[in-house]
Image (cartoon, grey):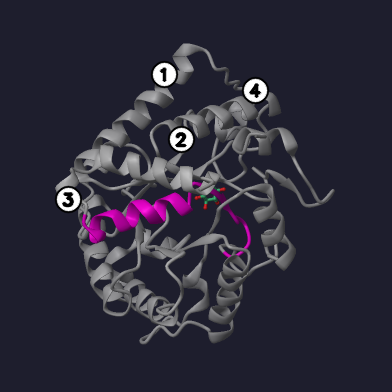
Amino acid sequence: MRIGSSTIKFITVLMGLLKILDANELNSEMTMPFIQNESLRHCLNLGNALEAPTEGDWGIVLKAEHFQLIKKAGFTAVRVPIRWSSHASENVPYQINISFLDRINWVVNQAIENELAIVINMHHYQDLFSDPQAHRNRYLCLWNQISTYFQDAPNTVLFELLNEPNGKLTSNLWNDLLTECIEIVRKTNPDRTLIVGPANWNHISAELDKLVLPDHNIILTVHYYDPFHFTHQGAEWVNGSDKWIGTSWSNETRQTQKIESDFLRVSNWAQEKKVPVFVGEFGAYNKANLQDRILWTNYVRQQAEKFNFSWAYWEFGAGFGVYDRETKKWRMSLLEALIPKP
Ligand code: BGC
């Protein structure tokens, strides 16, 4: 029998699993998120499209050809940030606009047709962060509708419950809200793998220790943009970031050790809780020097893989873009930092 590369990959994943899990804990409920996380291993964020107030406002409208290109470049999955809160009524039952749901369904089907796993999330729900009590019920009703609509989708469609909880949505409030949300989603999607990250912007901070995961079919997500003054120099949406322009990054020990120790901390946390890890966003903005961005991207990606984390680069074709929409070409050096040539 000829053993193909996918068989070898599967065996490697199983070996990794056995390292993480005690053999007698290898039941399907616990292994499922590890298997699902494998499908996210090389993921790309389709940022600035559906999390803009209206798709196109920030310059990107998703097209069928994008999914084909992404598949061909070697990615295994896409993560789609979605601003549901701008497409639903403000009053009970907080009905999501049906044409918006149909648009997301088109996106999901594009991923499925191109054999890409897909993460659909809830992005930029700012009102929930500034007034969690007032928006609690609306948030839950949105997920009730989304999870009901996609209940028959294949298991390569994953739900990420909330991008970067922050502001007044503290760890305690977030733990309560996500428990309630999972109860609702589980009514229609008992077996779907869910993605959840800690408060304080999904950052690898002390809030990670406060996160409580209510069931076993969950992947932990964290975002990685450190050092922030390097990755967000000149970012128009970050006050004062102009002053950071010129901040460099090199793979000298002092810089690399920080990334390694951050990831080690996450890995220890995840091993103790027996959950797989998805670095759901990482990237450096185009105001930073390209050579440094390539080095940083390559290093973070390699560290993620070393710890068996899946990852999603932020993002496809805007300010962090690995793809240049004007020339319709991949930025090859950045692409190869993510997916090295065999
Ligand atoms: C935000 C984007 C931002 C990116 C990097 C994402 O979570 O939604 O607007 O560009 O992080 O800061």
Q: Is residue 42 above or below residue 258?
A: below
The quadrant in which residue 285 appears is: top right
Please report contact status of discs 1 and 2: CB closer than 8 Å, yes or no. no
Distance CA(mark 4)–CA(mark 3): 50 Å
Please report contact status of discs 1 and 4: CB closer than 8 Å, yes or no. no
Q: Position of residue 260 (x, y in %)?
A: 40, 24
Q: Residue furthest top?
A: 253
Q: Check disc 4 and report the residue beneath it.
A: 246
User: In the drawing, does residue 309 fall left or right of residue 326?
Assistant: left
Circle 2 SS class: helix
Distance CA(mark 1)–CA(mark 4): 22 Å
Of the pair 18 and 182, the residue shown nearer to us = 18
Amino acid on which disc 1 is placed: Gln
Amino acid on which disc 2 is placed: Glu
Q: Check disc 1 and report the residue beneath it.
A: 257
Amino acid on which disc 4 is placed: Gly
The quadrant in which residue 230 appears is: top right
**Residue 214 part of the magenta-drawn span:** no
User: In the drawing, does residue 102 fall left or right of residue 255?
Assistant: right
Q: Earlier in the sequence, mark 1 or mark 4?
A: 4
Distance CA(mark 1)–CA(mark 3): 33 Å
Residue at (43%, 47%) from the top-left corner? 10
Q: Is residue 95 above or below residue 269?
A: below
Q: Position of residue 16 (x, y in %)?
A: 34, 39
Q: Earlier in the sequence, mark 1 or mark 3?
A: 3
Total numbered circles: 4
Q: Is residue 308 above or below residue 186?
A: above
Q: Check disc 3 and report the residue beneath it.
A: 25
